Structure formats: C-alpha cells, structure tokens
Image (cartoon, rainbow, N blue to C red):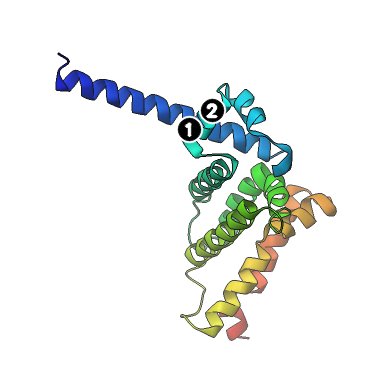
Amino acid sequence: MESGTRRSYRMSARSAAMEVTRTRVIEAAAALWMRQWFDDVTLQHIADEAGVSVQTIVNHFGGKEGLADAVAEWVASQTAVARQAPTGDVAAIVTVLFADYERHGAANVLWTAQMDRVPVAGRAAAHARAQHRAWLEQVFADRLPAPGPDREHALNLHHAATDIYLWKLWRHDLGLSRADAERAMCDLLTSIDPRKRNNA
C-alpha cells in the first residue's frame, strides 16, 4: 500500500508538471498573438508551438477564449514586474516605460486594434488601461493633487502623455530614434507637472 508521503510527493510532482505545461502553452500563445491577429491563430497552431496536443490546451483552459484570458493575465503580471520605477524620477520612469514598449509595444497595438470585435481583446485592453493608470498614480505620486477633479485631470494628462499610441507615433510613424522619443516624452511630462502649472 502506498504511503501518504509517497502519494503526496507524486501529487506534487504531477502538479508541478501541469504548471510547466500550462506556462509553456501560455508563452506559446502569447508569442503567436504578438505577431498575428487573434482569429488567425488556431488552437492547433498554439499546440504545435508549445509541443502539446489541442486536447491538452482544452483540458487546461477550456478553449481559445479561456487561454486568451490566461495570456492576458500573464502579460499583465509580466508588465507589472518590468515597470518598476522610482517615484518622481521622470527620466527613469520614461526609460522603464520605453523598455516595455520597445519589447511589446507593437504587439499591444495589434491587440488593441482588435478590441471592438474580439471580446477577450476588449477585456485585456480595459485591464491594461486600468493597470497603466494605477502605475501612473504610483510613479507620479509626488506630483498628483489630492483625490478630486484636479487629480483626475492630471491623471488624464499623464495617461495621454505616456500612452502606447504616442510611443507608436514617435517611434514608428515619425521615425524618431528612441533617444529623441524618450526626450520628447520627458519634456511633455515635465510640461504637465501640476506643481509647476499651479505655481505659474
């Protein structure tokens, strides 16, 4: 008869193996969806990329929508880790943000472009906006007014000044170098500092 310790070990090993498979599928799906439209990527494509069966994906996520939600959560967690920046240091904040945008900006733009017709993309975009706004409240905590209309106005300005589409405009549409684009964003953020405008 199998001992409790041995049974517990086997269950832990199985759970660890399942988590490894789950992560591999999520990373494979993320890689594909960063390059292609949501509708163009099938579960078979993802299974081939991850080296698993379609049934394995279904067992873990229930289907394409469930997998897409898991990918969105995984990307959000990766973003939170990547965007660690000191409060109030505009140059450092912009550098951290650009590092994230340079890695995943094009994929984010692609994903956002589908949000009106792909429900999971809409959910992911809404979560990303909320996450970005919370990040702005954290890294610009030193300059934001107290809760109220003035704070919301300031947050709206900072959101616009750091939006992914502004990065796209500067880096892709206008062809600015990263250094010039970062300088432009720093100048913009400096110009909308509520403390300077209130003292003007």
- How far apart marks 1 and 2 lie (CA) works out to 6 Å
Q: What residue type is disc 1 on?
A: Asn
Q: Residues at badges 1 and 2 in contact (C-beta under 8 Å)? A: yes
- At 58% from the left and 85% from the top, the residue drawn is 198
Q: Quadrant of residue 191?
A: bottom right
The residue furthest right is: 174
Q: Amino acid at mark 2?
A: Gln
Which label was assigned to residue 59?
1
- On-image quarter of the C terminus: bottom right
Residue at left offset 73%, top offset 58%: 165
Quadrant assignment, res 116: bottom right
- Element class at badge 2: helix
Percent across and percent down for residue 115 are 68, 56
Would residue 145 appear left or right of 170 to someone viewing this image?
left
**Measuring 55% from the left and 58% from the top, which residue is drawn there?**
127
Q: What residue did someone put label 2 on?
A: 55
